[in-house]
Image (spheres, helix red, strand yellow):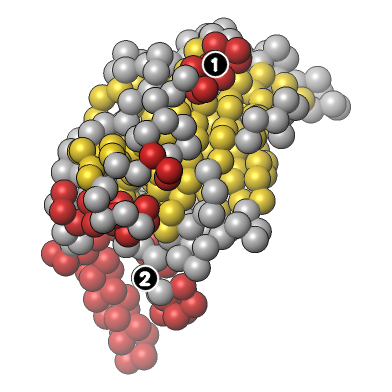
Amino acid sequence: MKKKLIVKILAIIFQKLIFNLNTFAAEQTKARYEKIAQEFTKNTNVKIKPSMLKMKGLSFKESIGYLGKGEMAVVKGSPESAFKGKEFYQIVIDYSNCVKDYYGHNDCNHSGGVTRSEVRDKNKPTFSKGTEKWIHYAVRPMQNFFDSRKKHISQCYAKIPGRGGGYPTFFLTFRDNYLWINLQQAGVLNSSTGNYNQKSIWAKLKNFEGKITNNLGASEWTSILVHMINRSDKKGLIEIFIDGSEKPTYKFEGPLYSSPPKEKPTTKCYLKIGAVAENNKRALQDDIKEKFGDITENMVVWYDSLIIGKTRKKVMDNVEKDK
């Protein structure tokens, strides 16, 4: 009985330590974030300008975790480090700076402990029923992104009708040695009944084995082109082209949203871009820290050439013109 009580007390103490992470939060200053950019570009003359991510063809507003202190910023003075042009974006997230109260939402305790810095479509939705668009991202995780946690870099978020919550139509996610896509509302045909059943699908888009640095970053940029037709029937489509490939690395045809029992289909989603890391509480446990170190702090990812449009040609032409 005493043993059980001791275990319970220790569990409560551990939870309190997790919930009070912000007491020992990482410094959120332009100087700190600028130093991180200088270290990764190996250029002491680099400067950052705190700024929301910008996407050609879409307007953003701040979302969870965006403070404008430099955690999300334009990196200037290192054109050789960019995917295209002269500048790019850097995002730095720390679990010690997780958001405890965002309109009643506690990220610190959500999905095993979440931290993030995101922006979202200002004039949502990005995709209504039947909308077709092409989206390009260039991304390069620089630190603490290749482990068993889920680190999302973009999602198209849909609310459940009549409820406060929701879930993404798709996630783009780094986990282990891979870049993944996760379709959370896909309709998969049941051949025996002829009906579509809602299912979450995970698919690998790129294997980074041999391309991961000592600090769990990537040694190269990755170009991601998403083509999506937002429909709830067999004409729905999402296909992903990686690193300029003419053929899709992944293709799904069918309903991108479907109807759970007694609910109307979720037809609209709005684009969110930024770094989101889940399962940070697990990463703070001794066995993970012994293997990887403190991977819940200084999670860094770079973005470039963020463009959305109606055709592949228009989007890719704009990628080449990116300055």
Locate the N terminus and report the quarter of the image it occupies. bottom left
Q: Is residue 223 above or below residue 321?
A: below
- Residue 9 placement (x, y as % from top left): 27, 80
Q: Quadrant of residue 273?
A: top left
Which residue is label 2 attached to? 294
Q: In the picture, residue 15 is in which quadrant?
A: bottom left
- Residue at the spot 29% in from the left edge and 42% down from the top edge: 77
Q: Amino acid at mark 2?
A: Asp
Q: In x, y percent, where is residue 236?
A: 66, 16
Q: Is residue 213 above or below residue 88?
A: below
Q: Residue at x 65, y 41 (%)?
A: 205
Instruction: Indicate the quadrant containing the C terminus: top left, top right, bottom left or bottom right.
Output: top left
Q: Nearer the viewer, residue 67 or 278?
A: 67
Q: Dot 1, crowdedness within 10 Å: few (<14), some or many (≥20)?
A: few
Label 1, secondary structure: give it: helix
In the displayed structure image, the side of residue 58 where residue 222 appears, left or right: right
Amino acid found under the numbered disc labelled 1: Asp
Which residue is farthest right? 192
Q: Quadrant of residue 258?
A: top right
Measured Cα–Cα span from mark 1 to mark 2? 41 Å
Asked whether, in this view, residue 220 is left or right of residue 47, the answer is: right
Residue 282 makes an appearance in the image: no
Relative to 109, residue 206 above or below = above
Q: Which residue is mark 1?
A: 317
